[in-house]
C-alpha cells in the first residue's frame, strides 16, 4: 500500500529533486496527489524525528500511482546537453528505418568508417597462437600491465617513433584511440577550455560536453558554448586561422582529418605547435589515419620541433589492420609534457589508466605485435592500398559528375560538397534513391554543413556498384 505524505514531507521530497515548490514540480504532478512508497514516507518521518533509520530507508518517488517507477537520482545535466544521439548510431537507426520501409533494398554502406576486409593471416595466426596458449599452464596469463606489454610498447616506439625521441615508457597501449580520448578527458577534468577542428570527429566535442567543459548548445550556431570551433574549409586550405583563434587549454587536432581526409602539411603543423607553445596549451593529436599518408605530410606530431613539450598523440590499429572489432590502440604522453605547476602529465595519465583500465586484451596485443613484424607491416600496407584504391574510385566518380571533392589521397574518406543543401537532406536523398548510406557532414560540426563523407571501407564489388548508382542518380 502506498502512503500519503504530509505537505511538509512533500516539500522535503521536492527539495531533494531540486524543486523549491509544488508549482515547479510539473513532472511530479500536483502537490496534493503525490503518492510515495511507505518506506519513503517512513524515512521522511524518521528524519523529522531524528531516527537513524532515515539514513538507510531511502527509496524512490512515484509521480502517481499508475506512472513509471523513478529513482531519486538526478541525471547528469552535462549528458543532458548533448543533442539527440551519437552520430553513427543515428545513421544506423535511419538505415534500419529505410530497410523496414524497403525490405528488398540492397544497401551499400559508405557511412561509418568500419573496415570490411579480413585481417591478414600473419596477424590472426599470432592471435590464435596466443589464445590457444591460454589453455596451457605455460601459456596462461591473467592481468597484465595496465600500460601494455613491454614488447608491444617497444615495437610501437621503434616502428612509429624510432627517430622522434620517444621512449617505451611514454607509450600507453589501449583498447583504441576513442577510449583513450575519454580517459584523457577524465584526466583533464571539467575546468579546462577546449578547441577542435570544425569539422572533426564527434567524440572530441561530445566527451567535452559530458565532462562539463562546455556551455549549452546554441541551435542558431550549431555550437556548444565555451568551445572554440576552428573552421577548416576549402577556403582556408583546411587549416584554421590561428591568428584569430582564442587561447584554450586543450586543442584536439586530427591529421589526416576525419572527415575531410586532408593531411596537414609540415608548415601548418609547425604553426600549430608554435601556437600551443605561445599559449601554454596541450595538443591532443589524433593520428588514426597516418598510415594512409602518401606524400611528405608528417605522420606524427613529434616530427615537429617543440611538440614534445605540448602534445599527446593517440593512435589506433583499427584502420591499419582491420582491428575495429579486435580493439587496440596507443597513446604517447612525453615525459617533457608538464602542467602549469610543473607536474608531469604522464604521471596523471598513468594514474587514470591504472584506475580505469586493466590493460588491453593479451590476445589483441599479440595481434598488435604481429602487425609490427616485417610481414605484418607488409600485410597492413596491402590492406591500406586496397582501401585507397576504393577511395580513388569514389573520388573519380564524384569528380566526373562535377562535384567538388576533397580527401581520398591521404585518407580513406572522400569529402563531397553539395552547395546550398542540407547535409542530412543529401544523406536522405542518396539513401532513398540509391540505397547508399553516407555520412552527413553536419554531423561532424557546423563546418561540415553542405558536405557528405563517403567512406572507402568496403569490398571492391560494393564500391564499384556504389559508383554506378551515384552516377545514375546525379547524371
Image: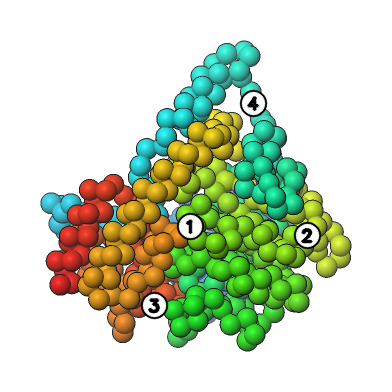
Give me the disc on residue 294. 1
Q: CA distance from mark 1 to mark 4?
A: 40 Å
Between discs 3 and 2, the one toward the N terminus: 2
Query: Disc 1 vs disc 4: Cβ atoms closer than 8 Å?
Result: no
Residue 405 rendering spot, x and y as whole percentages = 35, 72
Give me the disc on residue 337. 2
Between discs 1 and 2, the one toward the N terminus: 1
Q: Which residue is mark 3?
A: 449
Q: CA distance from mark 3 to mark 2?
A: 36 Å
Residue 70 vertical placement versus 191 (above, below): above
Q: Is residue 132 left or right of residue 146?
A: left
Near mark 2 (Cα within 10 A), the count class, few <14, some 14-19 or many ≥20, is some
Between discs 4 and 2, the one toward the N terminus: 4
Query: Disc 3 vs disc 2: Cβ atoms closer than 8 Å?
Result: no
Query: Disc 1 vs disc 2: Cβ atoms closer than 8 Å?
Result: no
Q: Nearer the viewer, residue 446 or 299?
A: 299
Between discs 3 and 4, the one toward the N terminus: 4
Secondary structure of residue under mark 2:
loop
Give me the disc on residue 77. none
Residue 151 rendering spot, x and y as whole percentages = 67, 33
Q: Which residue is mark 4?
A: 142
Which mark is in front, 1 or 2?
1
Q: Residue at x 83, y 68 (%)?
A: 340
Amino acid at each position: 500500500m502506498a502512503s500519503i505524505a504530509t505537505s511538509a514531507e512533500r516539500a522535503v521530497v521536492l527539495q531533494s529533486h531540486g524543486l523549491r515548490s509544488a508549482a515547479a514540480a510539473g513532472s511530479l504532478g500536483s502537490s496534493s496527489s503525490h503518492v510515495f512508497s511507505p518506506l519513503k514516507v517512513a524515512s521522511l518521518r524518521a528524519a523529522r524525528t531524528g531516527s537513524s533509520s532515515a539514513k538507510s530507508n531511502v527509496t524512490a518517488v512515484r509521480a502517481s500511482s499508475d506512472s513509471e517507477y523513478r529513482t531519486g537520482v538526478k541525471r547528469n545535466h552535462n549528458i543532458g546537453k548533448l543533442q539527440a544521439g551519437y552520430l553513427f548510431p543515428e545513421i544506423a537507426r535511419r538505415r534500419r528505418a529505410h530497410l523496414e520501409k524497403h525490405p528488398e533494398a540492397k544497401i551499400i554502406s559508405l557511412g561509418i568508417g568500419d573496415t570490411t576486409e579480413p585481417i591478414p593471416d600473419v596477424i590472426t595466426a599470432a592471435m590464435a597462437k596466443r589464445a590457444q596458449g591460454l589453455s596451457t599452464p605455460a601459456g596462461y596469463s591473467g592481468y597484465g600491465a595496465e600500460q601494455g606489454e613491454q614488447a608491444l610498447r617497444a615495437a610501437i616506439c621503434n616502428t612509429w617513433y624510432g627517430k622522434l625521441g620517444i621512449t617505451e615508457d611514454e607509450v600507453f597501449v589501449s583498447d583504441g584511440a576513442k577510449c583513450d580520448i575519454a580517459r584523457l578527458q577524465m584526466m583533464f577534468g571539467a575546468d579546462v577550455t577546449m578547441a577542435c577542428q570544425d569539422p572533426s570527429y564527434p567524440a572530441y566535442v561530445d566527451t567535452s560536453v559530458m565532462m562539463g567543459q562546455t556551455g549549452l548548445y546554441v541551435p542558431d550556431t550549431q555550437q556548444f558554448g565555451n568551445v572554440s570551433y576552428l573552421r577548416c574549409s576549402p577556403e582556408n586550405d583546411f587549416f584554421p586561422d590561428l591568428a584569430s583563434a582564442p587561447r584554450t587549454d586543450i586543442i584536439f587536432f586530427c591529421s589526416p582529418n576525419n572527415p575531410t581526409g586532408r593531411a596537414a602539411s609540415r608548415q601548418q603543423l609547425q604553426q600549430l605547435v608554435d601556437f600551443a607553445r605561445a599559449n601554454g596549451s596541450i595538443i591532443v593529436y589524433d593520428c588514426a589515419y597516418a598510415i594512409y599518408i602518401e606524400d611528405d605530410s608528417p605522420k606524427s606530431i613529434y616530427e615537429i620541433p617543440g611538440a614534445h613539450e605540448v602534445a599527446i598523440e593517440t593512435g589506433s590499429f583499427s584502420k591499419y589492420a582491420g582491428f575495429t572489432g579486435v580493439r587496440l590502440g596507443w597513446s604517447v604522453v612525453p615525459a617533457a609534457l608538464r602542467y602549469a605547476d610543473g607536474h608531469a602529465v604522464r604521471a596523471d595519465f598513468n594514474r587514470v589508466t591504472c584506475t580505469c583500465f586493466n590493460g588491453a586484451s593479451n590476445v589483441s596485443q599479440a595481434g598488435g605485435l604481429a602487425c609490427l613484424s616485417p610481414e605484418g607491416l607488409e600485410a597492413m600496407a596491402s590492406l591500406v592500398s586496397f582501401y585507397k584504391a576504393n577511395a580513388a574510385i569514389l573520388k573519380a566518380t564524384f569528380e566526373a559528375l562535377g562535384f567538388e571533392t576533397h580527401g581520398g589521397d591521404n585518407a580513406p574518406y572522400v569529402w563531397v560538397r553539395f552547395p546550398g543543401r542540407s547535409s542530412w537532406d543529401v544523406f536522405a536523398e542518396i539513401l532513398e534513391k540509391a540505397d547508399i548510406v553516407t555520412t552527413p557532414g553536419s554531423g561532424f560540426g557546423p563546418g561540415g554543413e553542405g558536405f557528405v563523407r563517403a567512406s572507402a571501407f568496403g569490398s571492391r564489388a560494393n564500391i564499384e556498384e556504389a559508383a554506378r548508382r551515384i552516377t545514375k542518380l546525379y547524371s
